[in-house]
Amino acid sequence: MKFRVVLEYDPEAASYSAVCPELPGCASAGETEEEARRGIEEAIRLYLSPTAIALSPTAKLVEVTVG
């Protein structure tokens, strides 16, 4: 999968930020652009990884494929 990532240098903090606009709240930072890129790749992986969901006895969990 490919995601757009916005990399931005902050001269005041002397570091780079990385944000994935398609995944709200998915962000990272680093002292170098490369460090920020590695961080956002890991953040995207974690964002997309499944987590346990507490369901009521009457709920049904299904999967949907898009694309």
Image: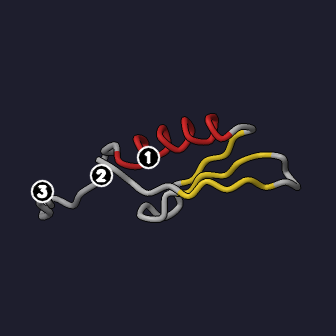
> Residue at image x 84%, y 54%?
11
Whether pointer 2 and pointer 3 mark residues with C-beta atoms closer than 8 Å, the reply is: no
Q: Pointer 1: residues within 10 angstroms few (<14), some, or many (20+)?
A: some
The residue under label 3 is which amino acid type?
Thr
The residue wearing badge 2 is 53
The residue wearing badge 3 is 65
Real-space CA distance between mark 2 and mark 3, rounded to the nearest whole angstrom:
19 Å
Considering every residue shown, the one lying at the far right of the view is 12
Of tags 1 and 2, the one toward the viewer is 1
Give the x, y percent position of residue 32. 71, 37
* Image side of residue 24 versus residue 62, left or right: right
> Residue at image x 61%, y 54%?
7
> Residue at image x 54%, y 35%?
38
Of tags 2 and 3, the one toward the viewer is 3
> Residue at image x 79%, y 55%?
10
Within the image, what quadrant is residue 57 found in? bottom left
Q: SS for tag 3?
A: loop
Query: Can you say which quadrant of the picture contains the C terminus?
Result: bottom left
Numbered badge on residue 44: 1
Give above or below for 23 relative to 52.
Answer: below
Between 50 and 57, the residue placed more toward the observer is 50
The residue under label 2 is which amino acid type?
Ile
Badge 3 or badge 1: first in the primary sequence? 1
Give the x, y percent position of residue 51. 34, 45
Q: SS for tag 1?
A: helix
